Amino acid sequence: MAIATSLTIAACSVPTPPVITESPGVPAATDTTGKPVAPAEAIITIDGSSTVYPITDEVVKEYAFERKDYPEVKVAFSGTSAGFRKFCAGETDISNASRPINRREMDACKAAGVRYYELPVAYDALTVAVHRDNNWVDSLTVAELKKIWEPSAEGRITRWNQVRSTFPDRPLELYGAGSDSGTFDYFTEAIVGETGASRKDYTASENDYDLVRGVRNNPNALGYFGLAYFEESRTLLRAVPIDNGAGPVEPSAEAVREGTYQPLARPLFIYVNADSVEKNPKLKEFVEYYLNNGRFLARVVGYVPLPDEVYNIALTHFQTGKVGTVFGGAAPTDLKLEDLLQKEAAF
């Protein structure tokens, strides 16, 4: 398999032009300009998490490279929560998610008759980062992160020396996930202790590119986003080691595998509409390709591949029609790779 050696991502994805195949004697449909268009049921639509976007985008590119008859795949990102709203309304075939589906979204999908496959595709080390010229932050404790981000910090913790007295008296300028982002849900639960509990006086975006850009252009900044986005700008940023009581740990594939980067290590998912799979054989082929090759492409874009056994179990669930979620509407913030494997095996 030809695997890309570098990742080039634009803030807005431009879908590859569709390849239209014609049945003998049946002309392909055309638009008003005479250009061929794909049947609606043959188009694969994907939305959701910007954190998961890089790996899904890379899978789409490799799939198109390898297959002459690849379908049109439309990939966008609006945040995990916004993506689930579209998915549970039947507007998309695949929803990228940086957290498991929650109870409210499960109820929405059930009410709309949307059955889904929950398929883990990689692990992320959610990264807290500062500008490369920041020479005073050697690490942060979970308690200090809570002090920075909890709702009571709004308008009050605004300078670095208020976080730790040895830090300089400089403005503390924050960049973080917007409220439609699964990263926002996960980070607030893991750090503040309550999903959605956060100060509001910070630069918020569901687009991780915006957050990276903000931090790398501001020496006083601190932000958080997916590991793949940090890796892409590693020369312009510094990752902050996080101390959860056992000493500072940097975000890395090794720390995720060893289970030491807690509580900011998390699984990433795609959710696939089961009825769409039944109607569109191309969607089934694409998802199977994703699960067979995502383990390689996750590493290419900067995420941590899951153990082969997890991908194999997910593929079996998909091929045998096992729909639903193993998380029951909750998003655990201390889930290690072996825990995910046990959950998938017991599903």
Image (spheres, rainbow, N blue to C red):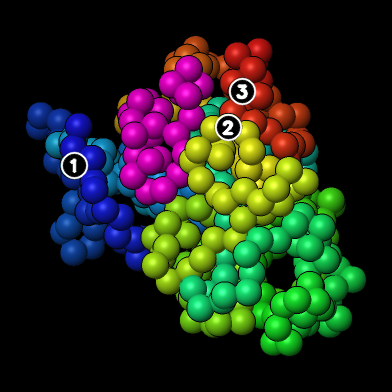
Characterize the local packing of mark 3: few (<14), some (14-19) or many (20 or more) Cα atoms within 10 angstroms: some
Per the image, label 1 sits on a secondary structure element best described as helix
Residue 31 left/right relative to 155: left
Characterize the local packing of mark 1: few (<14), some (14-19) or many (20 or more) Cα atoms within 10 angstroms: few
The residue singled out by tag 1 in the image is 65
Inspect the image, locate mark 1, and give the three-letter code of the amino acid beneath it. Answer: Phe
Q: In the rendered structure, which segment of residues is drawn in magenta?
A: 286-311
Please tell me which residue lies in front, 256 or 111.
256
Q: Is residue 292 magenta?
A: yes
Residue shown at the point (66%, 51%) measured from the top left: 248
Observer-side mark, 1 or 3, equals 3
Quadrant position of residue 268: top right
Note whether residue 40 is visible.
no
* Mark 1 touches mark 3? (CB < 8 Å): no
Residue shown at the point (86%, 81%) measured from the top left: 156
As measured in the structure, the alpha-carbon distance from the residue carrying label 3 to the one carrying label 2 is 10 Å
Q: Earlier in the sequence, mark 1 or mark 3?
A: 1
Please tell me which residue lies in front, 86 or 214.
214
Please tell me which residue lies in front, 206 or 279.
206
* Mark 1 touches mark 2? (CB < 8 Å): no
Residue 261 % position (x, y):
63, 43
Inspect the image, locate mark 3, and give the three-letter code of the amino acid beneath it. Answer: Glu
Residue shown at the point (18%, 37%) measured from the top left: 2
Number of marks in the rendered image: 3
The residue singled out by tag 2 in the image is 258
Inspect the image, locate mark 2, and give the three-letter code of the amino acid beneath it. Answer: Glu
The residue singled out by tag 3 in the image is 338
Quadrant position of residue 114: top right
Observer-side mark, 1 or 2, equals 2
Residue 137 % position (x, y):
64, 69
